[in-house]
Amino acid sequence: MVTATLINMSILMNISTHMTKTSPLIEQDNTDPYAWIRLWQLISPSLPIGAYAYSQGLETAIEKNWVRNESETQNWIKGILQDSLGTLDAPVLIRLYQAWLTNDLNALIKWNQFLLASRESNELYLEDQQMGRALWRLLNDILPVSNSEPDSNSLPIDAINQYRTLIKQIEVPGFAVVFSLATIVWKIPVQDSVRGFLWSWCENQVAAGIKLVPLGQTAGQRILSALIPTINSSVIKAIEISDDEIGTLAPGFSIACAQHEVQYSRLFRS
């Protein structure tokens, strides 16, 4: 049986030659009263970006009997949350958020490419791209394009169009770079953005586990409830982590994702 011990290992990955300490968080000036509702919209399972189609290796872990019940499902998800998303995706999301705030195209390209390069299987790489494209199509479609379409829930149209120009200069926008843009446009605070990002990932993993183990709906809610403290601690860790500590080493997760690509019978795309 593969346990969280196999997953819960992190690796230092030095991606910066000049910056080793965490920069102070840059926040937006104020919180829009609609920001919370926009966050709920952004992390909703009904958001049409295809997240439900991916298990991120969980399907293989269950197929191989590494994950067989509620407890093992919780441990598997918690391990990846702590030592993969919490040490890679979440801190990069924060840096992307700050890069959007300062219109730093070089930082946007750098961190987007770093995150894509960190995907350890072809399916994970394609998933990141597909969800990024889907979210950008959706966001671009629902945001106003002129002053004749006022939207009091988002930034002024000039700022939105400036962001449209910036994202077109990113060759392959991944999911995190588009997600962070959405949180900027909808004035969602950075810490809440990261909490929502991690919650959404956990919810998708639990939904996959319910189908595959299988588990009952109540068991799924027990797992989500148990993961809430880990989500919060992962946000704190993501804020404190320095650039040269960003990375992940989760061999059980990586092996499952790679083997899923050749799994004979499967329901999910990763």
Image (tube, rainbow, N blue to C red):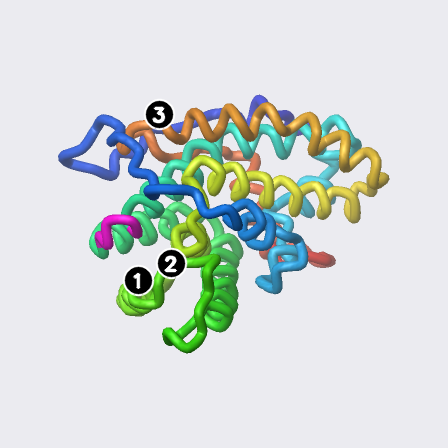
Q: Relative to residue 28, is residue 38 drawn left or right?
A: right
| Amino acid at circle 1 | Ala
The answer to whether residue 185 is above or below residue 255 is below
Q: Secondary structure at mark 2?
A: loop
Q: Relative to residue 23, is residue 155 drawn left or right?
A: right
Q: Position of residue 139 (x, y in %)?
A: 48, 65
Residues marked 3 and 2 touching at CB (< 8 Å):
no
Front tag of 3 and 2? 2
Residues marked 1 and 2 touching at CB (< 8 Å):
yes
At a point 30% along the width and 62% down the height, the residue shown is 159
Q: Would you call the spot at circle 3 few (<14 residues within 10 Å), some (14-19), or many (20 or more)? A: some
Q: Which residues are magenta?
A: 100-104
Q: How far apart are the two marked residues, 3 and 1, measured between alpha carbons? A: 29 Å
The answer to whether residue 231 is above or below residue 128 is above
Q: Which residue is mark 3?
A: 240
Say if the magenta span includes residue 171: no
Q: Would you call the spot at circle 2 few (<14 residues within 10 Å), some (14-19), or many (20 or more)? A: some
At a point 31% along the width and 48% down the height, the residue shown is 111
Q: Secondary structure at mark 1?
A: helix
Residue that extends furthest to the left in the rendered view of this protein = 18
In the picture, residue 244 is in which quadrant?
A: top left
Location of the N terminus by quadrant is top right
| Amino acid at circle 3 | Glu
Q: Which residue is mark 2?
A: 155
At a point 50% along the width and 62% down the height, the residue shown is 135
